[in-house]
């Protein structure tokens, strides 16, 4: 039988230039497709996202209500003839026999007396600077940096709140700490010339600012330089038993006629804040609690006050609160009628933006960015309002719950676990 052999080596010789060009182009397109296509597929599985770092915050439910300040006050008899100038600062503590008011026979003399007080304050300020310049003590520069920053922020806050009465004093404080910082870093400061000028002006005015009479404190307490007509609006001695209707009447009634312009003495260091609220707003406040109170449209700082009475009528849901404090300063001394916020229930948790919340398999949570991957974290909402939500801080890295400093994904499309992110 005749055998046939099949040759397996195939030699192809391409002689056509056009065919070579087409073939090379085809090979190039195949290679390009192999390289580029996966890139488009990968891109389609990633997402641009906007994130927000998780922080901790405390928010409060508040009771927002008008309130009236009640003090034990004794008006100073107004028998002065002339221009009255307070001899002490508003809210200052005084003892029996202390000078509280000086009376001048003319406005010019009263203006001279006011200028003398300004000169005294300026002299004290520059003497403080001079004392710092002479000091050889080594002072930590970081202390002055911190003091300058604190003074600057306090001044900015006063300006922002339009507390113009505080701006002058805060400006002086800022100038003083800046100067002391310069001295501590080696800058030479000589204020002897300014002190000489202040002393010369003081000596000139001193003889032309003699009061025609002086009013002395007949009792110890705090001096307040005005009477506003509410001095007897409420029975101070029976303050803890005040009723809802009595508080309502005291807040709504117009002030009585002023008894004079020489001021009054607050004879008891304890003063009270009375207001009305409802059972629903009261929360868990009971007598003996300490609450935080803020004052709207006032330069008074937040105060911690003790709840000394929670009085409820036999009918209705109205409740009267009586709060007590013994803190006094110039700003508090000027308080009488105030719009207040009483902080009731505190909630501390992780801040979660509403738009980030999602529900996955019946579990409420958010997606976070871990490296370049999206991961789902459960949240337990403990507080919510129209602006934000607070989630419980589980403080457990193995709980699959949201944690402090996680990067919450605020904006992203088609999110799921392990999704690659840009």
Image: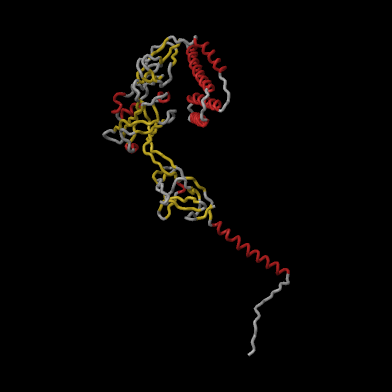
Q: Quadrant of residue 57?
A: top left
**Between 47 and 202, which is closer to the camera in this rendering?**
202
Res 159 seen here: no
Q: Taking 309 as reference, is 357 above or below it? A: below
**Residue 228 on image: x %, y %:** 39, 21
**Residue 310 on image: x %, y %:** 30, 32
Q: Residue at x 39, y 15 (%)?
A: 98
Q: Quadrant of residue 261?
A: top left
Q: Quadrant of residue 44?
A: bottom right
Res 99 seen here: yes
Q: Taking 125 as reference, is 348 above or below it? A: below
Describe residue 170's horizontal placement relative to residue 261 as left or right: right
Q: Residue at x 49, y 49 (%)?
A: 409
**Between 181 and 262, which is closer to the camera in this rendering?**
181
**Residue 96 on image: x %, y %:** 36, 15
**Between 149 and 381, which is closer to the camera in this rendering?**
149
How is colour applied across the structure in the image?
secondary structure
Q: Residue at x 63, y 90 (%)?
A: 1
**Residue closest to the far left:** 314
Q: Residue at x 26, y 34 (%)?
A: 314
**Between 39 and 234, which is closer to the camera in this rendering?**
39
Q: Taking 41 as reference, is 164 above or below it? A: above
Total residue callouts: 0
**Residue 192 on image: x %, y %:** 56, 17
**Residue closest to the far bottom:** 1
């Amino acid at each position: 039988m005749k055998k046939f052999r099949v040759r397996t080596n195939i030699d192809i010789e391409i002689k056509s230039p056009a065919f070579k060009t087409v073939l090379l182009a085809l090979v190039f397109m195949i290679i390009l497709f192999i390289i580029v296509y996966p890139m488009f597929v990968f891109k389609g599985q990633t997402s641009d996202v906007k994130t927000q770092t998780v922080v901790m915050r405390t928010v409060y439910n508040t009771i927002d209500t008008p309130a009236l300040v009640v003090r034990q006050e004794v008006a100073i008899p107004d028998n002065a003839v002339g221009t009255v100038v307070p001899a002490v600062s508003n809210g200052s503590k005084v003892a029996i026999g202390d000078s509280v008011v000086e009376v001048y026979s003319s406005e010019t003399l009263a203006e001279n007396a006011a200028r003398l007080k300004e000169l005294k304050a300026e002299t004290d300020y520059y003497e403080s600077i001079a004392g710092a310049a002479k000091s050889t003590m080594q002072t930590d520069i970081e202390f002055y940096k911190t003091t300058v920053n604190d003074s600057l922020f306090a001044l900015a806050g006063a300006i922002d709140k339009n507390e113009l009465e505080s701006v002058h004093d805060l400006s002086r404080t800022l100038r003083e700490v800046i100067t002391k910082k310069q001295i501590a870093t080696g800058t030479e400061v000589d204020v002897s010339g300014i002190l000489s000028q202040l002393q010369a002006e003081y000596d000139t005015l001193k003889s032309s600012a003699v009061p025609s009479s002086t009013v002395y404190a007949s009792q110890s307490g705090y001096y307040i330089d005005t009477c506003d007509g509410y001095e007897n609006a409420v029975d101070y001695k029976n303050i803890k038993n005040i009723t809802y209707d009595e508080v309502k009447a005291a807040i709504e009634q117009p002030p009585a006629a002023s008894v004079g312009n020489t001021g009054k003495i607050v004879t008891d260091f304890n003063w009270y804040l009375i207001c009305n609220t409802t059972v629903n707003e009261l929360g868990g406040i009971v007598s003996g609690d300490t609450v935080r109170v803020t004052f709207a449209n006032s330069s008074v700082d937040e105060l911690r006050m003790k709840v000394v009475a929670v009085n409820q009528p036999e009918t209705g849901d109205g409740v009267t609160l009586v709060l007590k404090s013994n803190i006094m300063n110039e700003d508090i001394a000027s308080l009488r009628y105030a719009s207040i916020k009483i902080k009731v229930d505190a909630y501390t948790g992780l801040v979660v933006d509403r738009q980030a919340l999602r529900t996955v398999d019946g579990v409420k949570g958010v997606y976070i960015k871990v490296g370049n991957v999206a991961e789902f974290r459960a949240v337990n909402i403990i507080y919510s309002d129209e602006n934000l939500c607070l989630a419980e801080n589980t403080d457990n890295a193995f709980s699959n719950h949201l944690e402090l400093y996680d990067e919450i994904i605020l904006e992203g499309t088609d999110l799921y676990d392990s999704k690659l992110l840009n």
